[in-house]
Image (cartoon, rainbow, N blue to C red):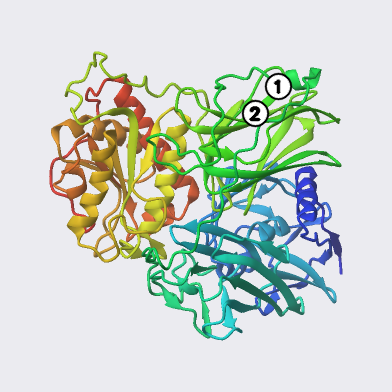
Amino acid sequence: MNRLRVRAGKTAALAVALASACGVPHRAQTIGTDNTFWFAGTHLVFEHPQLHGDSLAVATDDDGLGRLLAKAGAVLSYQPGQKYVVLTDAQRRTIAFTLGDPHFTVGGVLETAAFAPYASGDVAYLPLLDVARALYLDPVSDAGLVVLQPQIAALDVRAESTATLVTLRGGTPLHFKRLSKPGDDTVTLAFTGTGSTLAPDRTINDNILRDVAISVTGSPKNPTTTITFSAVAGGLHVLVPSDSPNSVTLAFAQSGVQLGGTTIPATGGGAGAVGALSLSEPTLAQRPAPPAVPAPLPAATLPPSAGATAVAGLPDEGGTVPSAAQTPTADGLTPATITALDTQSVDDGFTIKLTISGPVTYEWHRLSDNRWYVDLKPANLTIPGQEQPLNDPSIVSLRIKPFVGPSDHLATVRVAFTMPSPREVTLIPSIDGMTIAIDSQDDSGVQTAGTGELIDGQLVAAIVPLPIVAAAPVTEGAEQPWKFSLPSGVRNPKLIVIDPGHGGSDTGAAHNGLVEAYLNLDVARRLRAVLIARGWQVKMTRDSDVDVYQPNDSARDELQARDDIANNAGARLLVSVHTNAFTTSELQGTTTYYYTASSHPLAEAVHARLAAALPTQDDGIRKENFYVIHHQTMPGILVEMAFMTNPGDAKLLSSSAFLQSVAVAIADGIGDYTSSGGQPVSSTSSDTSANASDGN
């Protein structure tokens, strides 16, 4: 029997160093080519595996790989003659391989495979173990076998109004047994058939959830992961709907909060919750005293040095330092909080670990003199600023500084450093923040800037280069070359309101494993990241799975609440994001709706970009009396991305790359519209009624 040794590339070795620093053990093992794999309770047999160096390659059409993907809830897309192999997992993360290139991306994060994928005839061959790890399957040696052990690989904690939400994400559908008694302050769940390499202890201390403890028992073939959540005494905890069977979401709240959801059952899983999350504030008598807000810490006053001054003078820094409790400008975003910065020299580079609480957008730049910086916004810094030289082969000096953006007026935290040469820099997300990894090798790429958003432990990267001149922001009182005059209600010409359709007690359409409310919010967050990077202020009608007005409200109240957000803010534009559905599977395509005359040029501009960028059928623009685009006071449109009831469209909607393309196309269309002064642009158009059953 041939034996293969697992081999990791340079970037993978760096990831291992990071994992070890976080208390996550790395597992090295040898594997065989013939029937030596065990997965999901059975031997996993590959038909025509190939040895590539000392690693194993499997074909994209191999039945063994197909069974693995099916049990993990992932799908693979590859067409002969193409250079890309794209997998989409149950969490809707995209794993993209390029033939001939050992680098691949997992949810937008760059990784390095054991070897470069390659084509042979009409199939492509992929590095098996790299595919497995990307799908949260950990290769573990066990008596001559390699067990592809499903992992609980992510634990995301999110504050949501008066509750704390915890989402567990695994490599296969998650099933648990509740070990604690109903009503206990601690909730203990045992997940059978699933392991975990997460840190054994995590402190939360948010006055609702105190800490989380994780332990793993059993054998490599039959592991059990036990997770204990220590909540506030007398608190509430429920199971709420998850976005995938591979995830489980729990909500915790103080006593007195009306917490909707499903009582945590004796046994259950990610698909077991039927009650949507709903929240109501406790009365004043029931509310606990708020935690003390730490006073903002002063900036460090380290003496300047040659290394420190090298990072000074970066563009667009303001002189105002925001306080830790500062509220951002009219964009309405709640600032994230950066609470720690840790640095570490590793064998092949240097890492800067930022601990971040809350979603945040980022914009990074590489300058020609070997300086690199990233701006995180809106964000507050609760640790002292730093400016110091570093005696390391990969980094000369480092600085972290808070300031208020001079153009967008957002609280911003900048991390900047100088390198001895143009080293490769990679952003690596984690459940509690972001790591900036500086490689020992120089970057041979040409990209000098990038943007995106860190949310729920994932980086959503914008696929547009910077800098971008998308729109010359309108100044009040200036003469505007609009075909339709700027409405008098527009008081903030730099503000765009994005409305993710549905949410909370109204999930919208649900077909082919897709839920509209989740898809709409996903694209809205991506669109927000792109627009902010281009200089716009953005306000969301909702930034989580909640009702905007109140749970189980009337359609009119809910939709008017969304319009009220845009109208009261005096926004320049309103964009409502939806996913279409119908009673049969025949209808397909992308449609843009408008109603008011002033909205028609915006619909034309945005749809022209959507039609050019997306592989969906072009269904044109249509005039329709949808409430949300009839009762706003500024130009507004409603975009139906695709039909989740159509198999082809549903497959696209399952792809992160497609959702990102939708967001960028909408942003591009907004840029075309504003730069043309609102003049009509050429586009396919129709004023007939839509065939869709959904449209808000």
- Between 240 and 96, which is closer to the camera in this rendering? 240
Write down the quadrant of residue 493 in the picture: top left
- SS label for mark 2: strand
Q: Identify which amino acid the numbered label 2 is placed on.
A: Tyr
For residue 311, the mark is 1
Note whether residue 69 is visible: no
Name the residue: 66% across, 61% down.
Answer: 203
The residue carrying mark 2 is 373
Name the residue: 20% across, 31% down.
Answer: 489
Write down the quadrant of residue 228 in the picture: bottom right
Give coordinates of residue 13: x percent, y percent: 80, 48
Vertical comparison of 546 with 593: above or below: below
Q: Identify which amino acid the numbered label 1 is placed on.
A: Val
Give coordinates of residue 26: x percent, y percent: 80, 59
Mark 2 burial class by Cα count in 10 Å: few <14, some 14-19, many 20+: many
Cα–Cα span, label 1 and label 2: 9 Å
Vertical comparison of 599 with 194: above or below: above
Is the C-beta separation of discs 1 and 2 under 8 Å? yes
**Residue pushed farthest front?**
285
Q: Which of marks 1 and 2 is nearer the N terminus?
A: 1
Judge from the rendering whether residue 492 lies leftward or rightward of residue 535; answer left or right.
Answer: left
- Between 176 and 591, which is closer to the camera in this rendering? 176
